[in-house]
Image (tube, grey):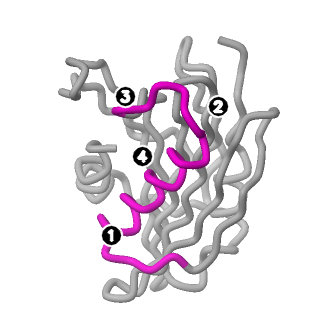
């Protein structure tokens, strides 16, 4: 969860190719237990993240496109083990992650749906970011003590666009 500010900074430095002109590419990190589709091969950054429980290898996958006044930023990271989560109420953890995201982007929660993905508790949140005229679509899934996230930060009005929906809806859990 502490990696989100770094993730957004890295995204800004990422590629700017048009999403519609690219072939969608599956991102499936070895042994991570999930897959996502990006409009093109994502920019991958690997680093060691310092957490409350020690250092953890982290991999961040990002894609960014700006064209014709539209900005699309798609990102995900290897699943994380949320600090302080010891198998309690999964909805409470999903609430906490959502609240942290709303606070971090100085946004306002517009809508949210409790869902399941492959039988696991999940949450899809739409967060307005008024000062930037953007919207964050956050999909999070909790499997055991692993939290998976797909994050799209897009120009206002693009939250229901085809590319945003394809990215968010492509998140799938795989066997570990």
Check if residue 100 falls in the magenta segment. Answer: yes
Q: Secondary structure at mark 2?
A: strand
Cα distance in 3D space between marks 4 and 3: 10 Å
Q: 10 Å neighbourhood of mark 3: few (<14), some, or many (≥20)?
A: some
Q: Secondary structure at mark 4?
A: strand
Q: Which residue is tagged 1?
A: 105
Compared across the picture, whether 35 is left or right of 138 comes to right
Indicate which label's residue lies in the foreground, 1 or 2. 1
Residue at the location (49% across, 83% down)? 68
Q: Secondary structure at mark 3?
A: strand
Q: Which residue is tagged 4?
A: 62
Q: 10 Å neighbourhood of mark 1: few (<14), some, or many (≥20)?
A: some
Which x, y percent locates residue 107? 39, 77
Q: Which residues are magenta?
A: 83-109
Check if residue 108 falls in the magenta segment. Answer: yes
Residue 39 sits above or below residue 161 on the image: above
Residue at the location (70% across, 62% down)? 165
**Which residue is outermost to the front?**
88
Residue at the location (61% across, 48% down)? 91
Say if mark 3 contacts mark 1, CB within 8 Å: no
**Which residue is outermost to the right?**
119
Indicate which label's residue lies in the foreground, 2 or 4. 2
Q: Secondary structure at mark 1?
A: loop
Cα distance in 3D space between marks 2 and 4: 14 Å
Which x, y percent locates residue 103? 33, 68
Q: Which residue is tagged 3?
A: 59
Compared across the picture, whether 142 is left or right of 119 comes to left
């Amino acid at each position: 969860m502490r990696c989100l500010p770094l993730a957004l900074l890295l995204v800004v430095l990422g590629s700017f190719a048009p999403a519609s002109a690219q072939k969608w590419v599956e991102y499936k990190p070895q042994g991570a237990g999930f897959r996502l589709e990006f409009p093109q091969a994502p920019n991958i950054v690997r680093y060691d993240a310092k957490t409350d429980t020690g250092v953890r290898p982290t991999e961040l996958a990002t894609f960014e496109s700006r064209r014709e006044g539209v900005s699309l930023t798609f990102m995900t990271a290897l699943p994380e083990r949320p600090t302080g989560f010891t198998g309690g109420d999964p909805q409470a953890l999903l609430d906490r992650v959502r609240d942290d995201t709303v606070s971090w982007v100085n946004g306002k929660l517009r809508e949210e749906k409790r869902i399941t993905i492959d039988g696991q508790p999940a949450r899809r949140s739409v967060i307005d970011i008024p000062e930037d005229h953007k919207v964050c679509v956050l999909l999070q899934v909790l499997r055991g003590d692993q939290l998976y996230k797909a994050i799209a930060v897009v120009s206002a009005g693009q939250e229901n666009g085809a590319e945003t929906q394809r990215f968010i809806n492509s998140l799938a859990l795989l066997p570990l």
